[in-house]
Amino acid sequence: MKRLLLAMVCLFAAMGQEAKKAAPAADPETQEVLRRINGLTPYEVPDLKLRTEQNYAHTSTDVEPFGSVKPYKEHFLVQMEYTGPGRAAPEPVGLKSVRIGFIGPIESTVSIATGGKSHEEVLGKMMLKGAQLAVEQANAKGGYLKGKIPFELAVANDNGLWGSTGNEVVKMAYENPVWAILGTIDSANSHIAIRVALKAEVVMINTGDTDPTFIETNIPWVARNIGDDRQQGYLLVDYMIRKMGYKRIGIIRSSNRYGRFGVREIKDSSRRLGHPVAIEMAYKVGGDDFSLQLDRIQEMNVDAIVHWGDARESALILNQMRARGMKQPYFCSDRSVSPEFEKAAGANAEGVICGYPWDPDRKDPKLDEFRKAFKARFQVDAETYAAHAYDGMNMLIWAVQQGGLNRAKIRDLIATRSKPWPGVTGAIPLSAVMDDAGEVFLARFGQGRWKYESRESLQIPRGFVPVRDRTSRGLETASR
């Protein structure tokens, strides 16, 4: 009798442990989405509440295209939807793991697409570590709870060759299938990858490509959880022109896609505010001598200089500027917020200001726990690419846990989420085009460290954005 009672106690204890490993309860909004997408036939499209934005990417009225002329059509305001049959696919059986793909620059290569020798492996390796930590933590909590199997990270190198990037996504989609993909950093390769993802119908979250045009592809399978160069550019222009009153701005940038598209909104916004960029000079990635570019910029007598490129070139350009007596304020992209830049620039780094997609100084227990776990696992400090990859992978894992092993449902849960994702990089609200619509910051270097400043702390209000009557265009504004 005692043995029977002991056996029953053990049985109930085991059942309790299994209960703890059940899929986490969905919030009411997620439950409603699941109700709408579950049980559909291949010929039914769910009635999901698609978002419609009043304004694209927080663009201030006075820097919108066409000035006061009302365009016939405005793009990227109405959310794309997936109307295919994928939601009717049944849950697979017999799997030993749930594979999630990772593609990023983790090995050194040479490619015309990246401007010669690759230069993003340091960023890609940190991105991979962030994704690995998220997967390992999920497995420590029971893995894929519905199937009681672990998550598995399928890793591929993004080597800078466009065809190769597409081939890697094809492998992930068909040869040894994954349920979702995280990556990558290089803009040109990201554009190739998401077009393959569109054909393969697999959701892809980007955590490292800040090209504004990445999300402007109208692909319903793509999301991004990092503030892009459009948002950082708007804030930099607002600071330089609206707050500081600089009238003549010079640009020096890398000659690759990152540099070319990174400064586009700075150029457009400056022109629309009545102070067009005085000069723009490009350089070949990997160079050491920038005298030609600086000669031309110096001749133009600019008030401030903006650099868009990697940390190495950023520091070299700054040092060469100061050596020739150029004392203009120096503004950069987020890639200069790094130990590499600080070490190379030395004393010249004092006062440098960069756009930045989040606030690492934010007081948040989740961020503290992430940093502690990351340092214990990899013996290095986490940085922005690791943190954003960690958030992106956790978003994918959440969608898999709630929606099951169905690519379309995973996509639906991310696309229809109206509440900001509570990430270690801060709240991540997704816009109608599934882009991170959260606040960006300015990082200012001084006294040996970076200080992060928001629009509010800088007292820079957004330009006035009117609420427009969209009824005449057949559009209805959905609540966020």
Image (tube, grey):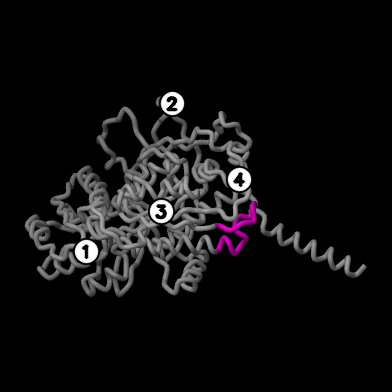
Which region shows up in magenta?
Answer: 137-151
Name the residue located 33 percent from the left edge and 72 percent from the top edge. Answer: 449
Graded by Cα atoms within 10 Å as few (under 14), some (14 to 19) or many (20 or more), the crowding at tag 3 reads many
Q: Is residue 109 left or right of residue 100?
A: left
Q: Which residue is mark 2?
A: 474
Pick whichever of labels 3 and 2 is earlier in the sequence. 3
Residue 40 on image: x %, y %: 61, 33
Pick whichever of labels 1 and 3 is earlier in the sequence. 3
Mark 3 belongs to which amino acid? Gly
Q: Which residue is mark 1?
A: 313
Comparing 278 with 189, the one in front is: 189
When asked about the image quadrant of residue 136, the answer is bottom right
Residue 217 on image: x %, y %: 36, 40
Name the residue located 31 percent from the left edge and 65 percent from the top edge. Answer: 337
Q: Which structural element holds mark 3?
A: loop
Mark 4 belongs to which amino acid? Pro
Q: Which mark is residue 92?
A: 4
Outermost right residue: 1
Mark 1 belongs to which amino acid? Glu
Q: Which residue is mark 3?
A: 183
